[in-house]
Amino acid sequence: AYSLLYYHYNFGLSNYLLGNIELSYLSNNAIYKLILSNSDLLNLREDLVLRAMANRVLCSVGMGDFVLAKTHLKELEAISVIASFYITYKHYLIYVLELIIFSKTANYSNGIKAFQKYKQQKMDFVSTVDVDTFIYQEAIYETFYYATCLYKTGSIKAAIRLMFEFVSLKKNIAKKDAYSAARFFYLVLLIELNDDELIYAELRWIERFLKAQELFFGVEKILLQFVKALMIKNTAYQIRSHYHVLVKDLEKLKEDPFESNAFSYFDFLAWAKEKIASL
C-alpha cells in the first residue's frame, strides 16, 4: 500500500505536468481510495496525502468540473491530520484552492475577500516554512490568481505591483513555465493600463530572455509576435484583426496538452476574446 501511494503520486504528478489531466486525476483519486481503506498511510505521509488531495482538486479545475472540484475541496477539509503543522498546511492549501476556484469561476470579489480573510493566518504559516522549497508551487498559484482577482475587480495597479515583484525577484526563473507566463501576464496588465513606454521596455526584456532559452513554448512565440504587431501604430480595424489572429493561434495551441499548461496560470485566450468583445 505504501508503494502504491508513491506510485500513484508520482504517476499523477508526471501526467499533470505533461498535460494529461484525466490520467492525473485517476491517480490522485486512487490515493484517496487508498487512505480511506488504510488510515496508516495518512499517518505515515500526511504531507504527500494532502498534496495529492490538493492535486485532485486542481485536476477537477483543469477538467472544467467545478462542482467536482468543490466536492473534493470539502473532502480535503474533512481529512483528519494529526501533526499541528500539517493542520495549518491543510488550511493554507484550502485557501489557495478556493482562490483558484473563485478566479476560474469569475467570482473575483470573493477571491479578494478570501485573501483578506486568510492574510494573518498566511503570515503566521509562512513564517514557519521555507517558501522556496516547501510551498513553492502553491505560492506561485496564489500570486497569479490573486493578481487576476485584483485586475478583474479594477485594481489593475495593485495587480501590476504584485506581478512586477514576482518577476523582479527572478528566483522564480527556475520554474520556466510559470516565470514566462508571469512576464506575459505582466505585459497583458501593461496593455490594459495602456502604458506604451513600459510595454516597450518589457517587450525588449522578454525578447532577450527568450533568446537566451534553449526551449521555446509555442505560446511564447505567439504572444511575442502579437504584442510586437500591436505596438506598431495601427488603425482600430488592424488592432481588432491582431486580436482575432491571436485568438485563432491560441485556440490551436490549447489543443496541445503540453502547451496548455501555460493557460493554467492565466487564460490568455479568454483575455483575447474579451478584448475583441470590448473593441
Image: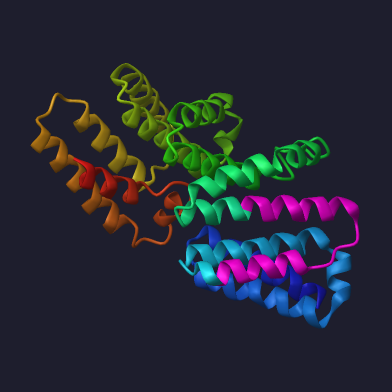
Q: Quadrant of the N terminus?
A: bottom right
Figure check: 147 above or below 260? above
Q: Quadrant of the C terminus?
A: top left
Residue shown at 60% from the left, 64% from the top: 57
Say if the magenta span includes residue 91: yes
Q: Position of residue 26 (x, y in %)?
A: 59, 76
Bounds of the magenta segment: 68-96
Residue shown at 71% from the left, 74% from the top: 31
Q: Position of residue 164 (x, y in %)?
A: 50, 26
Residue shown at 88% from the left, 67% from the top: 43
Query: Front-most of 114 and 253?
Result: 114
Figure check: 92 above or below 230? below
Q: Position of residue 41 (x, y in %)?
A: 84, 72
Horizontal relation, residue 246 to residue 50: left or right: left
Res. 24 image quadrant: bottom right
Query: Front-most of 154 and 240?
Result: 154
Say if the magenta span includes residue 87: yes
Query: Front-most of 45 and 18?
Result: 45
